[in-house]
Amino acid sequence: MQDNDKTAFDSAIRALEFEIANAGTHLTIDATARQAYSMQIQAMANELRGQVSSGRMTWAQAAQQAQEARNAIMEVIRGRSTPVGRAMAERLKREGKTLNELIARKTQQLHGAGADFSRLSTTQQNAVYAEIVKSAGTSNPRVTATMRNLSRAGRGLLVLSIALSVYSIAKAEDKAGAARREVAVTGAGIGGGIAGGALAGLACGPGAPVCVTVGAFVGGALAAFGVDYFW
């Protein structure tokens, strides 16, 4: 009975360990991607403003490039996120706005509802374009702050996962074998989580973070248990 209890306890510890590692890795990757996105769009906007100030570009050209560059950066960063992170981002915003949509939005923000961009003076139009460039370099502050907090949480979970691995290795008779097992099982759990999230994304479609998250954790659990069982 004691042997059965010990086996059950060890299995529970390992399950907790690789799921914590899975969650921590997802949070850390997605928070890092968000930080990279914020830095890239800010640098892009600063570069375009410099181009206009030096006379090498008009505000209209800068606005066009800002809109195109931000949407391109957004897609690249989403490609570097986990399936869960991508699903969450698509839930918030499926795709970037067109330049005409941005012009209409900024025109109304600056000159009131019903304002017509074509009837504005050249100076007023340039102010609209300048706002588009400025906005292109600014990420949603609430989302950025949330991802910053999640990054700290992700690092904390990874530390906890490492602590559980150290505990499992320390109490094992064959410490070298236990260490190899911990690396294999945890790695399988993380890889399975990414793969499971990707498959869930294909099944559920874009912008379905709950479905993708479930797929990530189920995929991670199946992969980790599979490696642990056949070890």
Image: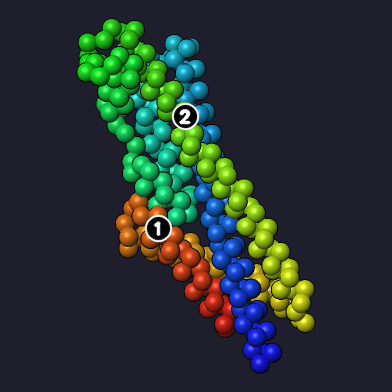
Mark 2: secondary structure: loop
Q: Position of residue 114 (x, y in %)?
A: 22, 18
For the residues labelled 2 and 1, the Cα–Cα distance comes to 27 Å
- Which amino acid type is shown beneath numbered disc 2? Thr
**78 sits to left or right of 109:** right
Q: Mark 2 or 1 closer to N-term?
A: 2
- Which amino acid type is shown beneath numbered disc 1? Val
Q: Residues within 10 Å of mark 2 (few under 14, many from 20)?
A: some
Q: Nearer the viewer, residue 197 or 113?
A: 113
Mark 2 or 1, closer to the camera: 1
Q: Residue at x 64, y 58 (%)?
A: 158
Can residue 61 be seen from the camera position used here? Answer: no
Q: Which residue is mark 2?
A: 138
- Residue 210's label in the rendered image is 1
**89 sits to left or right of 159:** left
Q: Residues within 10 Å of mark 1 (few under 14, many from 20)?
A: some
Quadrant where the N terminus sits is bottom right
Quadrant where the C terminus sits is bottom right
User: Seen from this angle, which residue lies furthest bottom?
Assistant: 1
Q: Nearer the viewer, residue 18 or 51?
A: 18
Q: Residue at x 36, y 18 (%)?
A: 129
Q: Position of residue 94 (x, y in %)?
A: 33, 44
Q: Residue at x 56, y 48 (%)?
A: 150
Mark 1: secondary structure: helix
